[in-house]
Amino acid sequence: MKRYLLTLLFVSFVMRFAIGQVNQNQYPNIVFCLADDWGWPHAGAYGDSAVKTPNFDRIANEGILFNHAYVSSPSCTPSRNAFITGKYHWELGSGANLWSTLPENHQSFIHLLADHGYVTGRTKAKTWGPGNLDNWITHHGSHPSNEAYQTFEEFLEYTNAKKTPFFFWLGTSDPHRGYERSSGKQSGIDISKVHFFKHYPKSDIIRNDIADYYFEVQRWDSLVGSVIAQLEKHGLLENTIIIMTGDHGMPFPRCKGNLYDSGVRVPFAIRWGKEVKAGRNVDDFISFVDIAPTLLEITGIKVSEDMTGKSFVNILKSNKTGMIDPDNRSDIVFGRERHVPAQEKPNMGGYPSRGYRNKEFLYIRNYKPDLWPAGTGKLGYTNFPNQWYSDCDGGPTKDYIIKNKDKDEEHFRAYQLSFAKRPVEELYDLKNDPDQLNNIATDSVYVRILESLRVKLHNKLTILNDPRVKNPDYDEFDNHPYLGSGGGTKKP
């Protein structure tokens, strides 16, 4: 009898975990669609009427639209590292920086899916990175998301994905700079209707630049549409979880690389057939680190004990809209370390900062306020030749703000908000200042609130293993090699 039971258990194990033996209808497929530099709120589902995102809007309408999704860090490599490991970037050593690597002791949840019977793949276009994964790949045997394919259609054709549950990472370099000048306007985008952050001065140069960014957002949306069409063609759509999002804010001043909503808040929608109630808008705060444990729970795979992200399956399975889990998801933390070494040479460090946000306030702690948040503006003094403010991607908006900073008060204000040094603490009242322009950290009216948020950030970072909690002057992140070349305008 004992031998018989053991045999049954072994057969069950093989049927559940062996590649090619898991029934397509037993576990959901997963398509993770990640754009480069696509930030909130640039999608029709969020009310942006200038950019056309019919496929994102469809995913949101037929699934769930998240209003408060945030990356761990507003920088490509650490944002993606946090996604695949389920850990905040500050837990990942060199993986906290742009143009870095991923230390070998950290696991990719995509490999866990593969170990349990999932066919996994990715596009040849940007998924992980930029950086160097040679040591990680040697140790783990393959790329964090495994084999690369030219298209999703090719992945379906050359693998067992039509019969076996699969995970596919759809990547792109859109809408990362550079852009073809006037491509947005020439395509029919109305520059008068683009979403215009209030930290910019009024200018058609900037509006045209945003329209060019929108043009690439729309191209990205079309790419996702082609994948949805393939899923429908092969009868796979209803058993597939589709997640569509961006890795951080747009590559413009005071966006990418910054801890304001324009930098860390991203579009986020999930479709999962009849498994989720369609047409819901969710206000709970979720982080990129929560994606891995969520997908592992859905697929019945044990979540690694060292993952600090938390599953939000309960939100997916709820029938409610608005705030669903206020006890656990009423706030969020994020931060940044080195983006590019943009300070005055020979300083190869970054601009370390952490942020805490809830619905009422945004609190930011800048650990080295003597440094420049977007890098030094002194030509010839930076680590990159002929670069200025190189922690901000080059483009018409950046050039316009810098060159016109002395034009009037509006332009000088835009320059200050984007490029000037910042104090140790920033505090924004989101009810009265949703655009996060007026720092009230020194306002006596907000003393108790400031103290409260300071403690909340400290307590959360303590739980989440941030080395800066014990030592605000911690500089190990700055000592890791920077593997890129060129400057802040380099496109990976």
Image: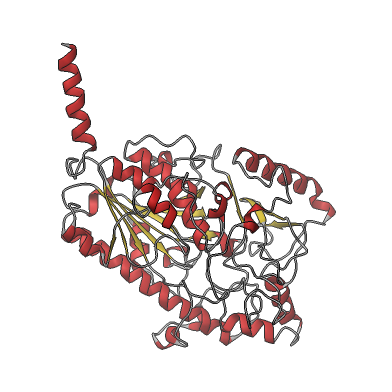
Relative vertical location of residue 250 with respect to residue 402 in this rendering, above or below: above
Q: Residue at x 71, y 74 (%)?
A: 376
Of 128 and 218, which appears nearest the observer?
128
Of 128 and 335, which appears nearest the observer?
128
Which picture quadrant has residue 242? bottom left
Image quadrant holding the N terminus, namely: top left
Q: Residue at x 52, y 76 (%)?
A: 490
Q: Seen from this angle, which residue lies furthest top?
A: 1
Q: Residue at x 43, y 37 (%)?
A: 304
Q: Residue at x 48, y 74 (%)?
A: 491
Q: Is residue 29 left or right of residue 428?
A: left
Q: Position of residue 296 (x, y in %)?
A: 37, 41
Q: Is residue 259 left or right of residue 21?
A: right
Q: Is residue 475 left or right of residue 157?
A: right
Q: Position of residue 225 (x, y in %)?
A: 29, 66
Q: Position of residue 91 (x, y in %)?
A: 56, 46
Q: Position of residue 59 (x, y in %)?
A: 34, 58
Instruction: Residue 201: tell me if it is visible.
Output: yes
Q: Is residue 375 left or right of residue 332?
A: right
Relative vertical location of residue 238 with respect to residue 302 in this rendering, above or below: below
What is the number of callouts on the image?
0
Instruction: Residue 280: tell me if it is visible.
Output: no
Relative vertical location of residue 21 with respect to residue 103 in this rendering, above or below: above
Q: Specify the color scheme.
A: secondary structure
